[in-house]
Image (spheres, rainbow, N blue to C red):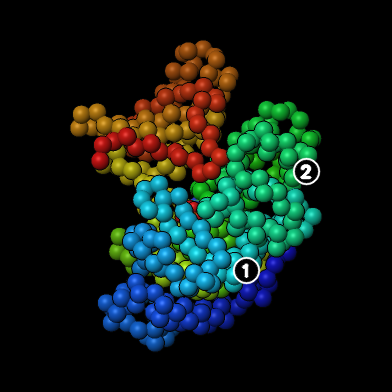
Amino acid sequence: MSIWDASHETMDRERLRALQLERLQATVARLYERVPHYRERLAALGAEPADVRALDDLRRLPFTTKADFRDRYPYGLFASPLADVVEVHSSSGTTGKPVVAGFTRRDLDTWAELVCRVAVMAGVQADDVAQVSFGYGMFTGGFGLHYGLQRAGATVLPMSAGNTARQLQFMQDFGTTVLVATPSYALYLAESIQALGAPDAFRLRLGLFGAEACSEEMRRQIESRIPILATDNYGLTEVMGPGVAGECECRAGMHVAEDHFVVEVVDPTTDQPVPEGEVGELVFTSITRECSPVLRYRTRDLCSVTTERCACGRTLARMGRIVGRTDDMFIISGVNIFPSAVERVLFAIEGIEPHYRIVLGRRGALDTFEVQVEVSEALFNGWMDDLRAFERRVTEELRSALLVRPKVKLVEPGTLERTEGKARRVIDERPR
Ligand code: DLL
């Protein structure tokens, strides 16, 4: 197992905390000087950069939210003049103005370095051929993985997302060994590879997946179709993009690049830190960015973090899988439901294909909750009675896990929409 930057990735945690404090102080001073939004926020608390004397003082600093990014769209949170900015990325902004983040040359260098770490910890080597099937463009996935994989010495195929036939062709012709995609697109590609029926034509051995939640069951579904080791990595536009955290070959959580980001886990309702190892909302502070540093960004992503040393030798904290988002939870008949809980039940049932969709609606005063799920060819084309019995079983298993009875609709394999980017699992048609 190789480590790209052992001096940081295996750093003694006391020294790491000292480095974090030094970098945090510099970042707070930079924001105070250069970004009116942060100066105003700190002033409102009667705080100044000099008040940050220990790492725990971070808890007294204000949070940053997605709304802050939107209110200052596009450049209002930049701490560098445009003359120093060489690249800009943004998130999709499906529910409002997009989030914008800028990169100076040094920021791009850091980005490449951190994505390279994630790639190397997953097992990427210089002789790998890496097919980047994340979208290139304003999304951080394509370019981020591109820069990092190049730094790791891999041969990069900048495919971008989509055009699946061409993806498969190049995968065979160029001898792709590493597939880089969202887990849902990876699953679609894996199904397409399986359908070709020529497994020997492919040399895939490793998957670098991220940008959306991937349950253990989803990972198994991908790995059962193509012979790869699937690894998860995490990041977000507000904090940098990919490279914030990634799994090593032990696959026992994602190592956070703590020499560049301070991670906190807070109770989303009380804003107070939760005990180590418990699930809460991730909050990140970036401490080395020049253009778009962010103080205590509320990610809305729910997961736990441990600082226990990993078998790989890295001392960096590890985050568990993202179990949900504070904003993807929906409420049916007063019960809180995360899509990940629905997925866990479905994927554990033999005969179910790993494609589903949750449709929420309203009839009269009541919410409706439908789960559409693909079943295997054999089941779908078999006896009607068997299909009905299967539907009852799926309904019952969902009801017992979620405590709410959904309407289950079994559909033919291949009917639900496949995505090339992030999957959209929940369709909420309820009037606002
Ligand atoms: O998705 C950055 C990225 C690109 C990460 C490629 C990894 C690989 P955004 O488009 O800003 O950035 O979306 C960020 O996606 O807050 C999470 O909710 C979700 N997300 C990202 N990675 C994971 C993951 C990129 N590994 C939002 N597991 C985040 C679960 C993830 N959710």
Q: How many marks?
A: 2
Residue drawn at (46%, 78%), measured in percent from left and top?
27
Residue drawn at (31%, 76%), measured in percent from left and top?
40
Name the residue nearer the viewer: 182 or 268: 182
- Disc 2 designates what residue? 174
Name the residue nearer the viewer: 285 or 368: 285
- Disc 1 designates what residue? 109
Image coords of residue 257 (percent x, y)? 57, 67
Q: Quadrant of residue 407?
A: top left
Q: Secondary structure at mark 2?
A: loop
Q: Are marks 1 and 2 in contact (CB under 8 Å)?
A: no
Name the residue nearer the viewer: 217 or 403: 217
Crowding at dot 2, Cα within 10 Å, few <14 / some 14-19 / many 20+, comes out as: some
Q: Earlier in the sequence, mark 1 or mark 2?
A: 1
Report whether residue 375 is seen: no
- Give how far apart the Cα atoms at labels 1 and 2 are: 28 Å
Residue drawn at (71%, 61%), measured in percent from left and top?
152
Quarter containing the N terminus: bottom right
Quarter containing the C terminus: top left
Q: Is residue 148 left or right of residue 409?
A: right
> What's the amino acid at mark 1?
Asp
Q: Secondary structure at mark 1?
A: helix
Image coords of residue 189 (percent x, y)? 63, 37
